[in-house]
């Protein structure tokens, strides 16, 4: 959700993660408890690091590796039913796999009921799982468990993890704080708030108080505003029900319909259809306390400022709370604290330095224009809630084409409004166009034009997170028999030189764009030595969405393809393949001393032994013996940097 708020504030928060460590964001604990029927519930608890997610148990064919439980059969107990997910989870449309996929974040619980007539028995087995974040995926992992059950109190076989990675969560909250801070500052420019600045300055300019007392009064005034807005966030935080509540807000049709309706109501208010105001007696009561003066008056001035400005700040606060409430329980409080801080800070400066007032622009029709522009943006974002319903429930009504058509019309109308061709009830006549308004006009029309190719199949990568999936488009020139408009013009099937020998596992694996290579490390290294070429190692996975994204957005570039075909021996190592090999081909790992019995386990072990990481994608350029020539490359959609990296490996060789 933070990407939507970030776009509203005008910037994008980038998060760059390191690949130089073993990536396994899930820790498991196993316990049991006796249920009402006298049987036992085995409890499998997964603690998933912040920013990562664990896939659900029911994943369609062709998707990522699902979470599964293998419980060893025994004469001492019987399984009652199947393993069940105790959390609601989140269902999203994954563009890489072109399917809806369920995943979990935070703490996740699975249960399996067993019955037994024994006083003491043990249940053994293992859980297979896979986890990903925005940039990398772990290979499938097997976590063994041995749960000892007795007729006494429930015990845990292994302790719960000490906690989630708080640093990543802290970064997410910091991003929300910064966005909220900017929105609070932007609210100053609305017509309900801007004219209150002189009133505030007049209050602090009266009398002959010392600078110390003036500072304290200004501080009390600012803190009162922060406290009032933070209280709203605290109320939402305390009344939400944690992760399940957030998942419901994100995916269920009822809250999404309500949020859509709220955004429409807020937008209509900004267009001048009506004002969202608080009861007049609240404002009058707070204002009467201000007249009494003193330090307490500074607090009531802050309260009056919040109440009077609610007609303009209410829709912004409401929209921010909707977004913030869709995450952890701390987000509403952090969001409202940031908004209050951003809103109060300019007032605090004006109270201390009243001379700044002379540099501010005068009130006028431009203030209402700020509201109307926000109204257009709210209308655009309201469509996201309808799109969520359409995607999650598979309605197929709000397709990508219709969604984009609505956005194009909205931003085209926004441009016309800024030009003065459209007027709302509270707008004044536009006598001339200033530089800043002119820049906004260019931005509005440019964005509308940018969206138009999306109607014909352009990916619109810059805002793909806000749009319905490309697969929902009903009209896509890339799916017709005519040459695609947005694909690279290159021959994707020509091969300059084939491999030295028939690649092993060629019946199971393939490389994109007609590239030729190997799928076994030793066989590929032998061929590289015969051809005297450097090795291009591609650690990838069937279920690695980022691997597919790299191939679609980077490898498709003709310059990258030319280098891969002509200058390297490619070895693609699938780290999530579950093909079990004959015992003679098993490998004993030098890392953990265990037998690696599948293709995926062996390739993952190669990656760990060679580069100290198990994440995909990972690309490496080595010599004939597998020694790295340059530092490995992880997920990176910058084509120029990728080409520069390939060239550096060729030159080093």
Image: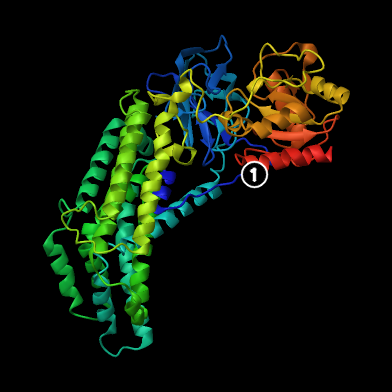
> Label 1, on which residue?
18
The image quarter in which residue 287 lies: bottom left
Vertical placement of residue 410 versus 503, above or below: below
Residue farthest to the left, as pictured: 281
Vertical placement of residue 628 versus 596, above or below: below
For the residue labelled by badge 1, is the local secondary structure a helix, a strand or a loop? Answer: loop
Q: Is residue 330 visible?
A: no
Quadrant housing the C terminus: top right
The image quarter in which residue 585 lies: top right
Tell me what residue is drawn at x 33 percent, y 64 percent. Answer: 434
Q: Is residue 167 toward the left or the right of residue 263 in the image?
A: right
Along the viewing direction, whichever of 516 and 161 lies nearer the viewer: 516
Q: Position of residue 391 (x, y in %)?
A: 37, 28
Residue farthest to the top, as pictured: 75
Q: Is residue 93 toward the left or the right of residue 611 in the image?
A: left
Vertical placement of residue 524 versus 339, above or below: above
Quadrant housing the N terminus: top left
Q: Position of residue 597 (x, y in %)?
A: 72, 18
Q: Is residue 357 visible?
A: yes
Along the viewing direction, whichever of 75 and 21 lies nearer the viewer: 21
Label 1: few (<14), some (14–19) or many (≥20) C-alpha neighbours in 10 Å? few
Tell me what residue is drawn at x 46 percent, y 15 percent. Answer: 82
Q: Position of residue 550 (x, y in %)?
A: 60, 33
């Amino acid at each position: 959700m933070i990407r939507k708020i970030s776009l509203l504030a005008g910037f994008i928060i980038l998060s760059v993660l390191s690949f130089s460590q073993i990536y396994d964001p899930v820790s498991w604990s196993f316990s049991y408890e006796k249920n009402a029927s006298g049987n036992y519930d085995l409890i499998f608890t997964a603690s998933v690091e912040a920013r990562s997610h664990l896939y659900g148990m029911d994943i369609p064919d062709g998707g990522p590796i699902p979470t599964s439980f293998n419980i060893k059969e025994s004469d001492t107990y019987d399984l009652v039913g199947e393993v069940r997910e105790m959390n609601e989870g989140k269902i999203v449309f994954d563009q890489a796999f072109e399917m809806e996929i369920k995943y979990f974040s935070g703490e996740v619980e699975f249960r399996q009921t067993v019955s037994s007539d024994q006083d003491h028995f043990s249940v053994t087995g293992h859980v297979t799982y896979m986890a990903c974040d925005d940039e990398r995926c772990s290979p499938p992992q097997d976590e063994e468990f041995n749960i000892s059950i007795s007729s006494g109190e429930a015990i845990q076989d292994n302790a719960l993890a000490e906690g989630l990675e708080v640093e990543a969560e802290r970064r997410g909250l910091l991003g929300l704080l910064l966005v909220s801070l900017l929105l609070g500052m932007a609210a100053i420019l609305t017509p309900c708030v801007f004219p209150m600045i002189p009133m505030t300055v007049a209050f602090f300019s009266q009398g002959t108080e010392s600078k110390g007392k003036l500072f304290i009064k200004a501080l009390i005034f600012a803190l009162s505003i922060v406290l009032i807005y933070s209280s709203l966030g605290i109320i939402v935080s305390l009344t939400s029900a944690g992760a399940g509540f957030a998942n419901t807000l994100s995916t269920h049709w009822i809250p999404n319909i309500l949020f859509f309706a709220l955004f429409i109501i807020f937008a209509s208010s900004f267009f001048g259809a009506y004002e969202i105001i608080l009861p007049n007696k609240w404002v009058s009561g707070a204002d009467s306390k201000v007249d009494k003066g003193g330090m307490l008056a500074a607090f009531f001035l802050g309260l009056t400022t919040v109440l009077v400005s609610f007609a303009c700040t209410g829709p912004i606060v409401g929209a921010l709370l909707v977004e913030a409430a869709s995450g952890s329980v701390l987000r509403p409080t952090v969001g409202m604290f940031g908004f209050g801080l951003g809103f109060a800070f300019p007032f605090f400066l004006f109270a201390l330095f009243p001379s700044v007032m002379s540099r501010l622009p005068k009130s006028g029709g431009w203030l209402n224009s700020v509201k109307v522009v926000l109204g257009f943006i709210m209308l655009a974002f309201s469509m996201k809630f309808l799109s969520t319903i359409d995607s999650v429930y598979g309605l197929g009504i709000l397709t990508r084409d219709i969604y984009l058509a609505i956005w194009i019309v909205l931003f085209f109308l926004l441009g016309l409004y800024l030009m003065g061709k459209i007027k709302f009830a509270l707008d004044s006549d536009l006598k001339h166009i200033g530089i800043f308004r002119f820049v906004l006009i260019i931005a509005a029309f440019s964005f509308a034009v940018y969206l138009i190719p999306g109607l014909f199949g352009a990916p619109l990568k810059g805002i793909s997170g806000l749009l319905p999936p490309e697969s929902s488009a009903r009209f896509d020139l890339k799916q017709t028999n005519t040459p695609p408009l947005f694909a690279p013009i290159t021959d994707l099937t020509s091969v300059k030189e084939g491999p030295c020998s028939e690649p092993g596992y060629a019946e199971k694996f393939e490389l994109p764009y007609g590239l030729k290579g190997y799928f076994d490390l030793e066989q590929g290294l032998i061929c590289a030595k015969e051809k005297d070429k450097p090795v291009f190692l591609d650690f990838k996975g069937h279920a690695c969405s980022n691997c597919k994204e790299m191939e679609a957005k980077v490898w498709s570039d003709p310059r990258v393809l030319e280098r891969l075909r002509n200058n390297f021996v490619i070895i693609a190592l699938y780290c999530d393949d579950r093909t079990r090999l004959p015992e003679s081909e098993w490998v004993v790992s030098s890392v953990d001393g265990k037998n690696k019995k599948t293709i995926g386990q062996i390739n993952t072990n190669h990656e760990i032994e060679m580069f100290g990481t198990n994440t995909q994608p990972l690309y490496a350029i080595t010599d004939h013996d597998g020694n790295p020539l340059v530092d490995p490359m992880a997920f990176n959609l910058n084509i120029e940097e990728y080409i520069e990296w390939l060239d550096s490996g060729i030159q080093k060789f």
